[in-house]
């Protein structure tokens, strides 16, 4: 099965590694050669890595109950693609600073997410249930041109209007800080089954937490990183936006296909017929 053409990988610049002076010797098996002091990644290994990762993600997301995949990429080149592809396949993501304990101290993270919902609920019309609102989209509508929360945009009945200007400012700063770091995982109700990471060297804290929790790591990994830390490495350029977009799109496709398989399986399963209660005649 082929999920990507080598020509597409070349066009996206996936084969360009880092300067040879910055390499990690453990990446030797994934390097084809060197050109102008730059390591060239063996795209045959990239295809193999993509195929293994695609199969793995498809398997865990098509299993009973559906697996959860957390997409992680905080570098500038990866942020937009991480959010876009994670949202496309309905999975959580982290594009801002990784908060220590996101996996190893998940209960605390859940408490912070509850606090986020409390703060956002203050901006809703009175008596509106926050569970019935798309809070991420709603709060974007509360921002002004500078990206700050604007009290003038809050409904007249919103609870936030009952506070002093100083308190509104304090609560708004708290809300924006939590939202910036945790909005992408607000619907992550359990620990993920796998992480998809762009640049494991940069995201080393996330990788270490995943290892401690026994969570598999799939990663686009460049020539300066240690592949031994990654369960399913995909050797490739992790600095090029086009390279990152191509690899993430293929991984997100695997998740989309896996989730679709679950839906198809559930729709084809015969519904259990309700059992008839035994009456006196049946007992006789």
Image: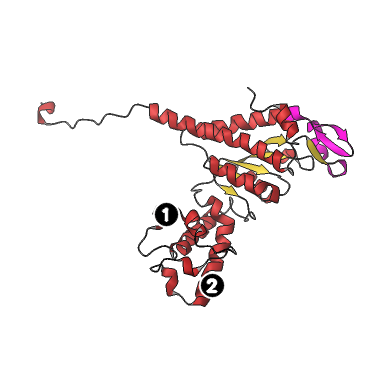
In space, the residues marked 1 and 2 are separated at their CA atoms by 23 Å
Q: Picture coordinates of residue 207 (x, y %)?
A: 66, 46
Q: Picture coordinates of residue 151 (x, y %)?
A: 49, 69
Left or right of 121, for residue 40: right
Give the residue displayed 75% in from the left and 32% down from the top.
10
Residue 93: in sight, yes or no? yes
* Region rendered in magenta: 20-45
Along the line of sight, the residue nearer the viewer: 120 or 146: 146
Report the quarter where the N terminus lies: top right
Q: Quadrant of residue 173?
A: bottom right
Q: Element under label 2?
A: helix
Give the residue displayed 74% in from the left and 29% down from the top.
45
Give the residue displayed 45% in from the left and 66% down from the top.
154
Q: Are the two marked residues, 1 and 2, in contact with CB atoms closer than 8 angstroms? A: no
Left or right of 138, for residue 6: right
Farthest residue to the top: give it.
Answer: 1
Q: Earlier in the sequence, mark 1 or mark 2?
A: 1
Q: Quadrant of residue 176?
A: bottom right
The residue wearing badge 2 is 169
Q: Picture coordinates of residue 133 (x, y %)?
A: 42, 54
Q: Picture coordinates of residue 186 (x, y %)?
A: 51, 52
> Around disc 2, counting alpha carbons within 10 Å, would you say few (fewer than 14), some (14 to 19), or many (20 or more)?
some
- Membership of 26 in magenta stretch: yes
The residue wearing badge 1 is 133
Residue 209: in sight, yes or no? no
């Amino acid at each position: 099965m082929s999920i990507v053409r080598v020509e597409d990988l070349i066009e996206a610049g996936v084969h360009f590694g880092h300067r040879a002076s910055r390499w990690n010797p453990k990446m030797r098996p994934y390097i084809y050669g060197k050109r102008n002091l730059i390591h060239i990644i063996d795209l045959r290994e990239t295809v193999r890595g993509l195929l293994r990762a695609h199969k793995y993600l498809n398997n865990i997301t098509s299993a009973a109950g559906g697996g959860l995949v957390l997409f992680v990429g905080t570098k500038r080149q990866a942020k937009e693609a991480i959010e876009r592809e994670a949202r496309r396949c309905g999975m959580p993501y982290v594009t801002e600073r990784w908060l220590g304990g996101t996996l190893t101290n998940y209960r605390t993270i859940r408490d912070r997410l509850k606090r986020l919902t409390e703060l956002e609920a203050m901006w809703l019309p009175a008596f509106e249930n926050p569970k019935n609102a798309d809070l991420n989209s709603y709060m974007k509508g509360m921002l002004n041109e500078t990206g700050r929360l604007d009290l003038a945009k809050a409904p007249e009945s919103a609870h936030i209007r009952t506070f002093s200007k100083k308190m509104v400012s304090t609560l708004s700063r708290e809300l924006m800080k939590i939202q910036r770091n945790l909005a992408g995982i607000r619907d992550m109700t359990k620990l993920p089954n796998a992480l998809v990471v762009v640049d494991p060297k940069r995201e080393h804290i996330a990788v270490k937490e995943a290892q401690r929790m026994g969570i598999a790591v799939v990663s686009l990994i460049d020539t300066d990183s240690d592949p031994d830390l990654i369960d399913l490495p995909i050797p490739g350029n992790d600095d090029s936006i086009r390279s990152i977009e191509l690899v993430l799109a293929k991984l997100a496709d695997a998740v989309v296909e896996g989730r679709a398989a679950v839906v198809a399986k559930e729709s084809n399963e015969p519904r259990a017929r309700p059992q008839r209660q035994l009456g006196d005649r049946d007992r006789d």
